[in-house]
């Protein structure tokens, strides 16, 4: 197994289960969301709870429903197999700002607390798993028509917008999505969601330099407590991960639609 930061899509290994839960180790699973309606129905029936099926049914558009079912069913399998708990027995609860967490009610005493984050866009999803460290992951399908500079002026810190303006036109999209996914990953990891202003912390935007958390308002030493990494997921997507633990290790796995419940 390779414990190193992902550099390109060749770093994503066929998944081996169960995933080992070790201190300082973060698993990142790339999930194919290219599922047929029959596969979505089967996963929902076999793995999801009643309230999850109800949530899926409330989606009026097929794509969000498919993304939710695929990612939540895969999350259940990954955690269940790692902890030797039937996937359907897992219970989730939600924080004040909507961040899902594993319920600790009835959680086995000998199993460490698992932190996770899920994101999906287009035909790809990402699931991050670790123990005892807050984690956030974000993936975005690139839109070549996105108004990058206008969005940055509206939502980002002034220095981040200035950094984007200095980029060559052909690198603007790379810089924007690098910064955007990094910032989304941070607010997911903190659990504050949209209550946290995207301009209240700064990340690096230059696509030719390593991603970094530079500053957090009111927390002068915050950056040294985090590990941040851009992820090369391929297929017209950008992605980043944030972990509240310095110098953690990553293992990157690929999960396909052919991996079905037993």
Image: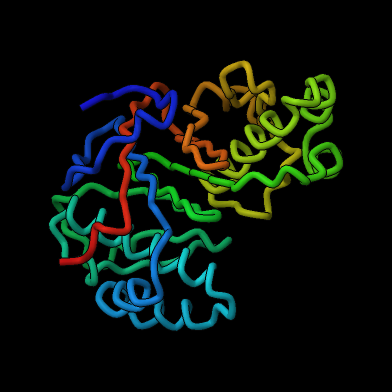
Instruction: Please report the residue visible at 23 percent of the width from the left and 63 percent of the height from the top.
Output: 260
| Most distant residue in the top direction | 209
Percent coordinates x, y for residue 173 in the rendering: 71, 34
Report whether residue 217 is seen. no
Q: Nearer the viewer, residue 138 or 43?
A: 43
Q: Residue 239's x, y, as percent? A: 53, 39
Q: Left or right: where does residue 7 sit relative to residue 174? A: left
Using the image, determine if residue 119 lies above or below residue 205.
Answer: below
On the picture, is 43 further left or further right than 56? left
Q: Is residue 81 left or right of residue 167?
A: left
Structure colour scheme: rainbow
Rendered image quadrant of residue 158:
top right
Instruction: Give residue 46's quadrant in the image.
Output: bottom left
Who's the residue at 31% across and 40% down the image?
Answer: 253
Compared to residue 237, the image places residue 157 above or below, namely: above
Say which quadrant the C terminus sits in. Answer: bottom left
């Amino acid at each position: 197994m390779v414990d190193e930061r992902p550099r390109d899509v060749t770093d994503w290994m066929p998944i081996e289960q169960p995933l080992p839960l070790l201190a300082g180790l973060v698993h990142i699973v790339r999930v194919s969301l290219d599922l047929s309606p029959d596969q979505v129905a089967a996963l929902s029936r076999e793995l999801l709870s009643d309230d999850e099926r109800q949530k899926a049914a409330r989606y009026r558009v097929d794509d969000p429903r498919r993304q939710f079912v695929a990612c939540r069913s895969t999350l259940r399998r990954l955690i269940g197999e790692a902890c030797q708990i039937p996937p359907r027995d897992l219970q989730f609860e939600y924080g004040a700002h909507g961040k899902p967490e594993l319920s600790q009610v009835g959680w086995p005493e000998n199993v460490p607390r698992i932190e996770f984050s899920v994101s999906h866009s287009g035909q790809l999803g990402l699931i991050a798993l670790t123990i005892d460290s807050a984690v956030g992951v974000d993936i975005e399908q690139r839109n070549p028509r996105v108004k990058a500079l206008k969005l940055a002026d509206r939502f980002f810190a002034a220095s981040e917008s200035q950094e984007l303006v200095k980029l060559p036109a052909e690198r603007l999209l790379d810089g924007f999505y690098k910064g955007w996914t990094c910032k989304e990953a941070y607010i997911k990891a903190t659990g504050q969601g949209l209550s946290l202003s995207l301009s209240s912390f700064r990340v690096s935007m230059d696509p030719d330099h390593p991603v970094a958390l530079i500053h957090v308002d009111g927390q002068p030493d915050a950056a040294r407590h985090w590990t941040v990494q851009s992820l090369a997921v391929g297929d017209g997507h950008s992605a980043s991960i944030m972990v509240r633990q310095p110098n953690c290790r990553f293992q990157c796995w690929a999960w396909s639609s052919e991996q079905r419940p037993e």
